[in-house]
Image: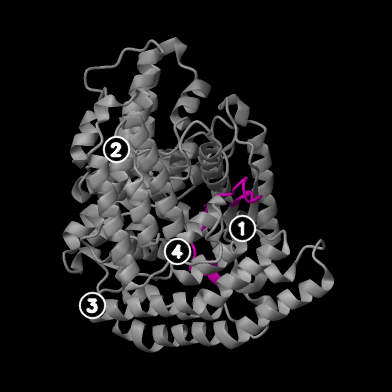
Amino acid sequence: MEQRDFDKAMKALPKTGASEKLSALQDLRYRWIMESYPENATYQGYPGVERDWTDQSLKSIERRKDQTRKLLATSRQLNEDKLSDSERLDYQLLYQDLLLDVRGYQFPEHLLPINHMSGIQRSVPAVLNAMPKRTAADYEDILARLDKLPGLIEQTKILMELGLEQKLTPPQITLRDLPGQIRALIPQDPAQSPLLKAFNNIPASIAEARKNRLRARAHNIYRKSLVPNWQRLAEFVEREYIPQASTETAFTKNADGIRWYAHKVRKQTTTDLSPEEIHQIGLEEVRRIRAQMDAIIEKTGFDGDFKAFTDFLRNDPQFYHQSREDLLKQYRDIAKRIDGEIPALFRTLPRLPYGIKRIPEYSEKSQTTAYYQPGSMETGRAGVFFANTYNLKSRPIWEMEALTVHEAVPGHHLQIALAQEQQDIHPLRRTKMYTGYVEGWGLYSESLGYDLGLYQDPYSEFGALTYDMWRAVRLVVDTGMHQLGWSRDEAIRYFMNNSAKPEHDVVVEIDRYLVWPGQALAYKVGQLKILEIRARSEEALGNNFDIRYFHDALLGAGALPLNLLEARMNRWIESQGGSLSRTAPADDSAGQAALN
């Protein structure tokens, strides 16, 4: 957001009235996010910045930090006691988000702009393909963004060079596929580039002559500007960045890394749990789930130990598809079966549909098993469950049901689409993601597979436990590598010894934790909190507990930090006539105080 626009908006904030101040601050914060990060605006259908990229110059980065500090200072002046209960929740969310952002500014996160999991080589084609493509004006917007792309590439390179100077890079071992990911964006034929995908299917409503001009301009920008700039970035990564990158894998080996990692853990989980506490929770969860897995092995009558059984699951041809198309077809069949059972567990369902697509070839090799991309009713874009079809021998059939309930419904699509469609909460909240809540919900959804009629054979049930184990192992290996001195190889061995996940998936996962430290902890921490809240609700409400009303309440305020989610659900239990135990937090004060 430009400084003059920010200053003008700050001066226009109401001087009196807590409710009015809060509403204006929310409006400004939402506008600030959309205009400061135009890629977000594209996904949300926010107008006015569709031709821009986030300005990653050092001057703009510092400007955004200063503006955020001013928003935090202004939010502290608001009298929370004058707000209603619903407004107080809005205020606490706004305040916590600003505070955590400002606390993070002590660490040079901007000097890590790219890795094999994220960065412009992934975000740029995704944003371009998410842009509206209905009119000639839409295509003019795409062309304008393509024209400005070399500037973003150069800004990214400058930040990487500064990172090298400060000895701050992702671990060298994780960067091996990065040059290939970049070059995959610039094939010789422009029509094959993920950057120009929109120009292959221009709508028939646009005149043929106009189509040809639009396509010709895109190809011209591609050849004269995009190809050489992406090529220079790939060569820089290959010749300078990777050779000089850190050979350390522990994030805590970076300057002030122990405090930095603790901050990441706190922000991702939205809890005060320390890395050591999370490591212990992980060890306990691994033991619990392993006992359930051993019981299923015994039930199958398999003649062999855990390692022999997981080797059988990893290698027997019966557990793998022979074609990418067959793999996607089965995912779609599973999703359709789930759709027919969902009303038994949920009273409120989203209007926005979802689809299932394969992960693009340019990123599939080093991408995880699957991911979800939110849709937008405003831009006419459905949600998408992206499934990885690379290396079919690492995509076992027995994991497909658990993966579908996590990424599609009742997992990410149902939760995120419902939040987007809630008109009684501010857009700032409708679009907010808290990893502990969002991924905790996805993992909790896997447990609902039993209620949905899934996991009917022991291999599929073992697959569901494998996914639960996968997230438990994450607690152990992420904290193990970054806090407790584990090597990458030790983490891989621990993962392989406690899971049936194929080795390719395990290596990809471990490398993910190395470049996204702390992120993977949020899944299991969030799931355990949701399960704890459900158990408390069932105990307090007894025969009056209704899973459909519980899910409505759990999802009814959009994504929340786990401390505020717990307080909200405790109030819901009491509103339903339930009596809470003395040990259950009854309000938001504990969570709020922890962040002050």
Q: Which residue does the numbered mark 1 point to in the structure image? A: 320
The image shows residue 247 at horizontal and vertical percentages of 27, 77
Secondary structure, magenta segment, majority class: loop
Q: Nearer the viewer, mark 4 or mark 2?
A: 2
In the image, residue 110 above or below residue 384:
below
Question: Residue flagged by tag 1: what amino acid is it?
Answer: Tyr
Q: How much space separates mark 4 and mark 3, taking CA atoms?
A: 31 Å
Mark 1 Cα shell of 10 Å, populated few (<14), some (14-19), many (≥20): some
Mark linked to residue 167: 3
Q: Which residue does the numbered mark 2 point to in the structure image? A: 15
Q: Which residue does the numbered mark 4 point to in the structure image? A: 503
Ranked by sequence position, the earlier of labels 2 and 3 is: 2
The image shows residue 384 at horizontal and vertical percentages of 60, 52
Q: Nearer the viewer, mark 1 or mark 3?
A: 3
Ranked by sequence position, the earlier of labels 4 and 3 is: 3
Frontmost residue, 297 versus 542: 542
Q: How much space separates mark 4 and mark 1, taking CA atoms?
A: 15 Å
Question: Residue flagged by tag 4: what amino acid is it?
Answer: Glu
